[in-house]
Image (cartoon, helix red, strand yellow):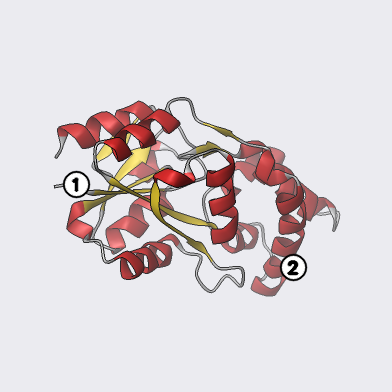
Amino acid sequence: MIKNILFDLDGTITNSYEGIVNAVKFSLDKINFKYDETKLISFIGPPLKDSYMELGFSETESKARIEDFRDYYFKKGMKEMHLYDGIEDTIKNLHDKGYKIYLATSKVESSAKKILSDNHLLKYFSYVAGATMDQSRVEKEDVIAYLLDKTGIKPEESIMVGDRHHDIEGAKMNNIRAIAAEYGFGNKEEYENSVFVAQKPTDIYDYVINNR
């Protein structure tokens, strides 16, 4: 029985492409690093350190790039986003049906709370779990484990909703089933271990209601 629904943020609740990509470009332009802009979409969802290291930066260099990323993102990038059509109603309707709603994101926790608050969604969430500023907690499996520890919710009564394989695999590592948000930034190969693929936010509501 599903009682708890864990949502990812970027690519699941918010279309944050513009703000994140602009912040990445800012961090790379600052050091005159050459890049293919079409590939920067890979930064949406995964921990920033992992994405920068995939561009060839060392762990130490990635930390410096993250600081520049945050410099832009906290000032402007957080506002360069919009909610996916239907996600607000989906979250509200699930909440009103008695389901407990949670957030599990690799975004810094304080930023995630502000985004939910600015978009009038925070009131629906029982708990918000995110990354730490020092990156000590950033991998999705660690964020989910932290959420489980803080709330005491049972994995077998929970389901994760996310658009990237980090969400699907992070949930699996915590013995939680996962719904793939196909409307986000992942691809079909990333959804192999999901129990359902939602083509639009309202599909999430339909699946949960029909699988009580």
Q: How many neighbours does mark 2 have within 10 angstroms: few (below 14), some (14-19), or many (20 or more)?
A: some
The answer to the question of whether label 1 and label 2 lie on touching residues, with beta carbons closer than 8 A, is no
**Horizontal arrangement in the rendering, residue 152 relative to residue 65 (left or right):** left
Of residues 9 and 98, the one drawn nearer to the viewer in this rendering: 98
Residue 64 tag number: 2
Q: In the drawing, does residue 129 fall left or right of residue 53?
A: left
Front position in the image: 7 or 168? 7
Rendered location of residue 150, percent (x, y):
35, 69
Q: Amino acid at mark 1?
A: Ile
Q: Is residue 31 above or below residue 137?
A: above
Q: Which mark is residue 85?
A: none
Instruction: Decide if residue 35 is in sight here.
Output: no
Q: Secondary structure at mark 1?
A: loop
- In the image, what residue occupies the spot 77% across and 57% down? 71
| Residue occupying image coordinates x 54% and y 53% | 113
Where's the C terminus, which quadrant?
top left
Which residue was labeled with disc 1? 2
Residue at x 73%, y 43% (from the top left corner): 22
Q: Position of residue 197 (x, y in %)?
A: 31, 35
- Residues at marks 1 and 2, CA–CA distance in whole angstroms: 41 Å
Q: Can residue 4 be seen here?
A: yes
Foreground of the two, 51 or 151: 151
The residue located at (35%, 40%) in the rendering is 180
Structural crowding at the residue carrying mark 1, measured as other residues with C-alpha within 10 Å and reported as few (<14), some (14–19) or many (≥20): some
Label 2 SS: helix
Rendered location of residue 21, percent (x, y)? 68, 43
Of mark 1 and mark 2, the one earlier in the sequence is 1
- Using the image, determine if residue 90 lies above or below residue 164: above
Q: Amino acid at mark 2?
A: Ala
- Of circles 1 and 2, the one toward us is 1
